[in-house]
């Protein structure tokens, strides 16, 4: 099957085939081509170039008129908890009344509340509920998504969640990566016995997850009131025995040591980083670990935004992701994430664009096949309405900007 997109006003996000991420000052540039065409063959970008007399004579099975709009790579959302049951709108009221995320969790709400709901929900029903959100993010331009478990907190329920994630992988055109987050919180049955719960994660959950091949990555909520650096190291060490690479939660609530332990275990990404010191920047320098920030969580919880600008000025790469979850970020709108990157983190539109495409593709291990306009990469593309500039996308952040989303498996 061959498709030609013609009449492209601006083709944005062109990168060489060997670029896996953009660091420091490289983040401030988005390579564009005006008046362009792009050819898709069997789901892959086969060619693109400046429209001229020759390109108008190209033949294909399907022709798409971009009507002068931008064509850009789909967003890659490298951190979500999109599989969950019900919602936590009751806690929303508590939050408005002034309770913090930690206070809600300490009352037995928060993640444990979602675990109770998930336990009472069948696998089929969970899949149906998750698919509503999956369809929502696809329509908003997400072409690849990482999805975590972590609302099961028992062997059976963690497996149930991961099977739902596998089913999403198999039944949608999205590129999906599954992340096992058994250490999201201590399951209710283990209250007061945290170290025994960590043993359960290491000795029962991880082997079962590995046996069924259900996880691409492993995660730990390494933060104040959740899991310690030592517990995190224990879990990551065990996961390494199964060849499962970490992507972890660190420094949301406190400077937790999570960045350091993540880098030590060669994490693909360390995520959140609302709290940070110069030490984290130094530890990340030269590592293969992508610092990932989640501005939707900062926005919703009213906590500080990560210091993305400082990281980039220090020469590091930064990725942005939605953290779509029922407790701290009930939205998977990556365009809004891109806008928050600009409006609240003071990134330039180019920096924010790269953080939501090539760098977030890296943070979920898919930047060899997604995240840029590159011949040979999957043609997961957004065709925009005829917007005046790249900056317009985050600037006019509530104006519908998507004309069409093209997703190829
Ligand atoms: O990334 N911080 C830990 N996990 C999620 C929130 C999960 C929840 O509250 O349900 C997060 O913000
Ligand atoms: Fe999260």
Image (cartoon, helix red, strand yellow):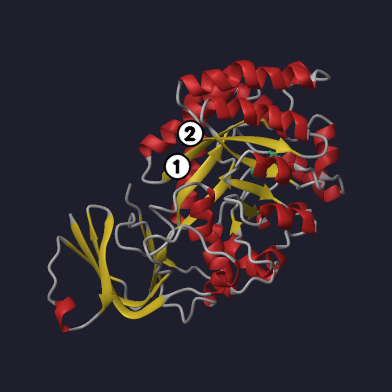
Instruction: Judge left or right: residue 180 versus residue 6.
Output: right
Number of residues whose C-alpha sits closer than 10 Å to that of mark 1, classed few (under 14), some (14–19) or many (20 or more):
many
Above-or-below relation of 98 to 126: below
Q: Is mark 1 within 8 Å of ligand 2?
A: no
- Front-most of 164 and 155? 155
Mark 2 and mark 1 residues within 8 Å of each other at the beta carbon: yes
Please tell me in which quadrant of the rendered image residue 371 appears.
bottom left
Identify the secondary structure beneath mark 1.
strand
Q: Residue at x 80, y 35 (%)?
A: 105
The picture places residue 213, in percent across and down from the top left corner, at 45, 26
Residue occupying image coordinates x 43% and y 69%: 13
Where does label 1 land, which residue? 176
The residue to which callout 2 is attached is 165
- Asked if ligand 2 lies within 8 A of label 2, the reply is no
Count of all numbered marks drawn on residues in the image: 2
Please identify the quarter of the rendering in which residue 234 is found. Answer: top right
Name the quarter where the N terminus is drawn. bottom left
Density class for disc 2 (Cα within 10 Å; few <14, some 14-19, many ≥20) is many
Image x and y of residue 355, in percent: 56, 62
Label whose residue precedes the other's in the sequence (2 or 1): 2
Looking at the image, the residue that sits furthest to the front is 286
- Residue 182 appears anywhere in the view: no
Where does the image place residue 307, in percent across and percent down from the top left?
A: 73, 62
């Amino acid at each position: 099957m061959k498709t030609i997109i013609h009449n492209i006003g601006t083709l944005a996000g062109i990168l060489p085939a060997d670029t896996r991420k953009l660091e420091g000052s490289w983040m401030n540039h988005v390579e564009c081509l005006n008046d362009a065409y792009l050819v898709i063959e069997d789901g892959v970008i086969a060619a693109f170039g400046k429209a001229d007399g020759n390109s108008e004579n190209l033949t294909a099975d399907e022709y798409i008129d971009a009507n002068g709009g931008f064509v850009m790579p789909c967003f890659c959302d490298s951190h979500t908890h999109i599989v969950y049951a019900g919602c936590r709108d009751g806690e929303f009221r508590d939050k408005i009344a002034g309770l913090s995320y930690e206070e809600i969790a300490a009352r037995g709400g928060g993640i444990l509340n979602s675990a109770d709901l998930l336990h009472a929900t069948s696998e089929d029903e969970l899949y149906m509920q998750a698919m509503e959100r999956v369809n929502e993010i696809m329509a908003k331009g997400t072409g690849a998504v990482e999805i975590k478990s972590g609302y099961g907190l028992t062997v059976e329920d963690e497996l149930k969640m991961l099977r739902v994630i596998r089913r999403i992988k198999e039944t949608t055109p999205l590129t999906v990566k599954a992340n096992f987050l058994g250490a999201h919180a201590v399951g209710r049955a283990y209250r007061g016995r945290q170290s025994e719960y960590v043993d359960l994660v290491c000795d029962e959950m991880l082997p079962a997850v590995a046996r069924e091949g259900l996880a691409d990555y492993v995660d730990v909520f390494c933060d104040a009131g959740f899991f310690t650096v030592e517990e995190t190291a224990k879990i990551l060490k065990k996961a390494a025995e199964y060849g499962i690479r970490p992507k972890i939660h660190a420094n949301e609530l406190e400077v937790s040591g999570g960045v350091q332990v993540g880098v030590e275990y060669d994490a693909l990404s360390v995520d959140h980083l609302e709290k940070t010191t110069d030490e984290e920047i130094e530890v990340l320098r030269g590592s293969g670990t992508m610092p990932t920030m989640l501005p939707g969580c900062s926005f919703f919880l009213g906590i500080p935004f990560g210091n993305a600008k400082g990281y980039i000025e220090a020469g590091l790469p930064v990725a942005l992701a939605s953290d779509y979850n029922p407790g701290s970020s009930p939205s998977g709108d990556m365009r809004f994430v891109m806008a928050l990157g600009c409006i609240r983190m003071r990134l330039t539109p180019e920096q924010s664009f790269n953080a939501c495409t090539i760098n977030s593709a890296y943070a979920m291990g898919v930047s060899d096949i997604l995240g840029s306009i590159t011949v040979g990469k999957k043609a997961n593309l957004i065709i925009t309405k005829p917007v005046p500039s790249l900056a317009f996308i985050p600037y006019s952040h509530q104006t519908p900007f998507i004309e069409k989303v093209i997703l190829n498996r």
